[in-house]
Image: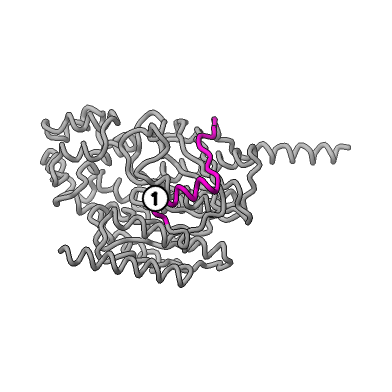
Amino acid sequence: MKNILSILMICSLLFTSAKSTLVDYEIIERYSIDDMKEFYKGQGIPKLITPILSGVDMYELYYHTNLPSGEEVVATGMYYVPTDYPYEIATMQYNHGTAMTNRTGYDYNGEGTICKIFAADGYAVAWQDYIGLGKATGFHPYQHLESEGQSAVDLLYAIEEINEQIGLKVNNQLFVTGYSQGGHATLAVHKTIQEKYKGEFEVTASSPMSGAHDMSGVQNEIMVIDYSQPHYLPFLLYGYQQVYNIFPSNEAFRKIFKPEYLHVVDKILAKEHGMGDINSMLPSKPFDMIQPYFYDQYKNDPDFIFTKVLEENNTYNWVPEAPVQFCYCKGDEEVYYKNSIVAMEWMKANGAKRIIDREVSETFNHRQCADYAVMYTKFFFDSFRNGFDKGRKGNFIKNTLVRTVINMEEKKLNKKD
């Protein structure tokens, strides 16, 4: 009898030891297979590239996660669930690009379309809004490796609870991807899972798309040149100030900006203006909005705390055990393609076994690159579902079709130039 009681107690402890992060969730949209066919038609999505094998239920969820300080906060996310998929369902964790306002609907930057496409072909897609964005309150630690990784892991715990409640069975495959800031977050998530959550989760493969992986190097060069997204610097500085206390107070932080740009900083903190509005109020060279003494320290002092913080948030200096495919475009004016080159070279030189170079285009800019990077990512992930343990670049016919379209688009762009 004592042995039976001991076994029951151990089982109870094991059962209750799983991390519970889910606060609440609700279904917000339902798409049948016919609805998805109409959606594809309206978006001009070729079914040959990505088939429709399932309807999709969309859930909005709230879950607990932690700031780097350890303070518990509530974050929000989305969950795209296949409803009719006839085969095994894999899980994909998706990370969206830069956003500066809270989400009022169900999407940022049209990236919800990406999640629907994957879900309609049998991926259960967990989308994180990140800390401080979506429908959450508080600040957003922009391009901060630790918080991007932790909030995604806690999201994965939350969807495990949802799966149990809705009766969704998924296999053990876990894919991670995202574009732009989401590319940076993709490696942050992969790294966090590998280094801190082995035994809880295991990444099958990741595909960072156009991410700023070399924050202290290649990407940092934009600070002193004409740049299409000058909001990047104040948004980055504010997030890092909240995490690292670079300055003794937020008031001291504000003083690093020239007086004529303080009102713009306030608008960023209020999260009421989009990137286009903010960019129009700022100089094209990001460091032109900053007081000279701060720039002098950054340029001349190798021990300057801002430089150290950027180095801490590089996402490439670790060795992935699972395959990683880097998608990028050489014409990207927002996230320099050399971020991907630096990351790939470092990982290969330090022993990574399966790093795949997926140059999407010689000429596409940041926006043009996205659609094709997503296609290549899906081909890559699909190859694992098709039984290739190390992954492949995907179906030859589909790859050839996409490459043909890219070549045609590049020729059009070259003629314009």
Residue 287 lies within the magenta run: no
Residues in magenta, as a range: 23-45
Determine the secondary structure under disc 1.
Answer: helix
Residue that lies at the very extreme toward the right in this rendered image: 1
Q: Residue at x 54, y 45 (%)?
A: 56
* Left or right of 277, for residue 141: right
Amino acid residing under circle 1: Gln
Residue 310 x %, y %:
29, 48
Residue 42 lies within the magenta run: yes
Residue 398 x %, y %:
44, 67
Residue 388 is drawn in which quadrant? bottom right
> Which residue has dot 1 on it?
43
Q: Mark 1: few, some, or many residues within 10 Å (few <14, many ≥20)?
A: few
Residue 412 x %, y %:
23, 65
Specify whether residue 353 is in view: no
Q: Residue at x 62, y 40 (%)?
A: 18
Location of the C terminus (image quadrant) = bottom left
Here the colouring is one colour
Residue 363 x %, y %:
24, 64
